[in-house]
Image (spheres, grey):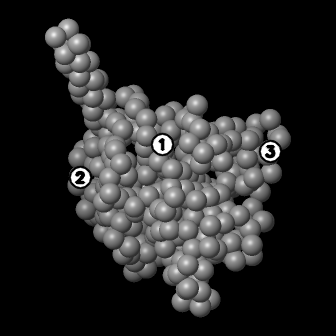
């Protein structure tokens, strides 16, 4: 009888902790939701511009209100700042926050180095999530370099505000519409692995969607352009090491070696990604390692929550997260 009471008490404690975690997750999402609703008049214009730019109707960085009186555009005082980041969409971000066009060979991009000045010889490509400016991504690149000891280069996923970014994420999930970050990542991965080099990728939130979509594009290119069978294409893709953090993707192509980090109280990865528990309906990639943990505060944060839990890739592949 006492044992049953203790069991029920323990369940009650876990339930209470779960509610606390969900409340924390809601608090973490509050700034993005507030931005979406308080700037609703501007959202329609921004969304139209964003979709036009993604599909190539509008030149990236050229706002719809160009040449129009400021009074003719709702929220025009905010629009140029919101659209300024699109000039870096799909660009590489390297040392000192400098940017480079997506056509630049990876070997020609000066990487972000650990603050110690010494690196372990590895290079990591990092793709950021939504609502992240180029400068914010650069801050994360420095954090990654210090945490991993590697050289780090970013592929920038530009932001046009939370609402437009979420709409674009839906397109990435359905593999529709053009995303410059997807194109840049796919091209870079293809060039590197067909040259026989290993590629190390890290991605957060929408960055995981971009990574999944890009890897599918690479597999298709290997099969259609290079004439490889699916098995042969997956063998070439095994040169890609992928780490996702709070990923918004629930499916990844087979071939690469994966480690996925999922916070059970992160609404992004639990609702749209690989879920809080093992689920046969999601596809983390054949042989993937999924590391789930629980953190209430800043549930979706990359620098504060996910990165500190990252362990060296080979250790993670062995399941050694201690």
Residue reaching furthest right?
118
Residue at the disc numbered 1: 291
Residue at the disc numbered 3: 119
Q: How far, Cα to Cα, is label 1 from label 3?
A: 26 Å
Q: How far, Cα to Cα, is label 1 from label 2?
A: 37 Å
Give the number of the disc on residue 40. 2
Under circle 3, the secondary element is loop
Position in image of residue 242 (x %, y %)? 57, 57
Q: Nearer the viewer, residue 147 or 67?
A: 147
Residue reaching furthest front?
1
Q: Earlier in the sequence, mark 1 or mark 3?
A: 3
Nearer the observer: mark 2 or 3; the answer is 3
Report if the CB atoms under discs 1 and 3 are less than 8 Å apart: no
Q: Quadrant of residue 127?
A: bottom right
| Label 3 neighbour load within 10 Å: few <14, some 14-19, many 20+ | some
Residue 269 versus residue 5 in the image, above or below:
below
Image quarter hosting the N terminus:
top left
Nearer the observer: mark 1 or 3; the answer is 1
Position in image of residue 299 (x %, y %)? 39, 35
Residue 51 versus residue 298 in the image, above or below:
below
Residue 293 versus residue 113 in the image, above or below:
above
Relative placement, left or right, of 140 versus 297 is right
Q: Earlier in the sequence, mark 1 or mark 2?
A: 2
Residue in the image at 59% along x and 38% along y: 320
Nearer the observer: mark 1 or 2; the answer is 1
Residue in the image at 70% along x and 77% along y: 194
Residue in the image at 53% along x and 81% along y: 230
């Amino acid at each position: 009888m006492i044992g049953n009471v203790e069991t029920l008490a323990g369940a009650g404690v876990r339930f209470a902790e779960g509610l606390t975690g969900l409340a924390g997750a809601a608090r973490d999402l509050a700034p993005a939701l507030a931005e979406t609703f308080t700037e609703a008049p501007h959202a329609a214009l921004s969304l139209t511009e964003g979709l036009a730019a993604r599909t190539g109707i509008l030149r990236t960085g050229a706002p719809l209100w160009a040449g129009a009186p400021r009074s003719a555009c709702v929220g025009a005082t905010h629009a140029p700042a919101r659209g300024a980041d699109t000039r870096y969409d799909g660009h590489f971000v390297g040392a000192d926050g400098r940017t480079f066009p997506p056509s630049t060979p990876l070997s020609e991009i000066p990487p972000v180095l650990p603050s110690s000045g010494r690196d372990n010889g590895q290079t990591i490509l990092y793709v950021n999530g939504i609502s992240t400016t180029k400068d914010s991504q650069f801050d994360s690149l420095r954090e990654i370099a210090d945490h991993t000891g590697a050289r780090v280069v970013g592929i920038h996923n530009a932001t046009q505000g939370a609402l437009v970014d979420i709409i674009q994420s839906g397109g990435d999930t359905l593999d529709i519409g053009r995303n410059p970050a997807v194109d840049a990542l796919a091209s870079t991965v293809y060039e590197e692995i067909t040259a026989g080099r290993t590629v190390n990728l890290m991605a957060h939130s929408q960055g995981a969607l971009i990574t999944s979509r890009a890897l599918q594009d690479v597999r298709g290119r290997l099969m259609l352009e290079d004439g490889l069978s699916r098995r042969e294409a997956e063998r070439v893709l095994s040169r890609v090491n992928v780490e996702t953090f709070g990923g918004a993707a629930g499916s990844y192509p087979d071939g690469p070696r994966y480690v996925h980090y999922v916070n059970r109280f992160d609404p992004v990865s639990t609702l749209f990604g690989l879920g809080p528990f093992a689920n046969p309906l999601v596809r983390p990639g054949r042989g993937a390692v999924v590391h789930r943990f629980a953190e209430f505060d800043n549930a979706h944060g990359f620098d504060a929550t996910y990165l500190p839990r990252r362990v060296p890739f080979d250790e993670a592949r062995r399941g050694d997260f201690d």
